Image: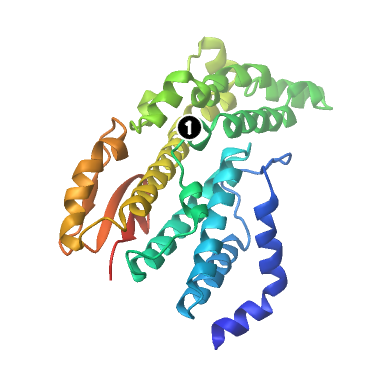
Amino acid sequence: MPLHALLARQSARLASLQALTGDDALWDDLSISPQTPLPGFGAAMKLLLTAPALDFVEGRQAQALDAICTQAATVRRLHAHTNSLVGAMVAVAWMDGIERELAGMLAALPDDEAIPVGCTQAFAPVVAADVSLCAPMRHEYDRAANAMAVVDPSRASHWATRLRLRLVVDPRGTRRLIAPTYAWACQRDVLAAQMSDRSLAATSMPPVHYDLFDAVSNTMGLILARIAPPDYAKYLQRNEDYAAGLRLMAWVLQHRSDTAGAADWPHRLQQALPALQQGGNRHFAIDPDGRHVWMDYRAKRPGHEALVLLLGP
């Protein structure tokens, strides 16, 4: 079978990826941009999801469920303990795949099939560490500040170069301009909004305050400060989508055994909406045939407009 051959060829890589289950944090001491391509991650994630899927279809359901829920617990732990914006977004994408696969497994099992306790634990109630991007944003601020230091006029060797740089960039002024953007993710009201799943738009970020001196002698820094907010708001929205997905998966796990068929799911969802929405207005729906539950994403991107979980065959 091709999948067996694939997993055999990739056994060493798979083992190294599965070793992540023993890690408590994902801490980044490097300067990596969120836009930097991550070679091989897509393939690595598919590899990790393929192994339990193959176990499941070959009849090793308990082993498959244990493996996929162990992945969920690992991703959640690493996501909650990272200072890397790249790492956090990787975890968000990985959890999306885990939730879809786990829901598919559950839908194929009898309603009274016992589920490993690790699955319930992996999707325990959302806490502040699940939604906060404070540590990653502080790291991004340090990275941006270090990048500006590279063009510090005082480091230029020639006086003419120093003069030209002073006309367009002021590293200290740039740090002052961009600080509110990065600190926004650490504010209590922002964390409260994330916990209650209220939409965080770029327009809710603090405006960039600058004066005539910034416009005249720090053009580069001013441009950097003014283009960052829409991008960073999107990352916080993705984190809200991640937390909402955790709540939805927990709901599916809780009610898979006490729901009386497809016709009962809409009623169950209506009852659960206050807990799922957490005071926000996120849209949830059951499709007409009762086989899927839909949860809209706020940070939509091609192929990822919603989280769709299978409820039944």
Q: Nearer the viewer, residue 82 or 108?
A: 108
What amino acid does circle 1 point to?
A: Ile
* Few, some or many residues within 10 Å of mark 1 (<14, 14–19, 20+): few
Q: Quadrant of the N terminus?
A: bottom right
Q: Is residue 183 above or below residue 132?
A: above
Question: Dividing the picture into quarters, in which one does residue 102 lie?
Answer: bottom left
**As drawn, is 147 to the left or to the right of 154?**
left
Q: Is residue 274 above or below residue 270?
A: above
Residue 14 locus on image (x, y percent): 66, 68
Residue 281 locus on image (x, y percent): 25, 35
Q: Is residue 17 visible?
A: yes
Q: Is residue 306 visible?
A: no
Q: Nearer the viewer, residue 163 or 290?
A: 290
Q: To which residue does mark 1 refer?
A: 227
Helix, strand or loop for disc 1? helix
Question: What colour-coding does the image apply?
Answer: rainbow
Question: Dividing the picture into quarters, in which one does residue 259 lie?
Answer: bottom left
The residue at 48%/74% (across/down) is 56
Q: Is residue 129 above or below residue 287?
A: above
The residue at 28%/30% (across/down) is 279
Q: Quadrant of the C terminus?
A: bottom left
Q: Is residue 9 above or below residue 282?
A: below
Residue 57 locus on image (x, y percent): 45, 78
Residue 265 locus on image (x, y percent): 21, 55
The residue at 35%/33% (across/down) is 197
**As drawn, is 22 to the left or to the right of 43?**
right
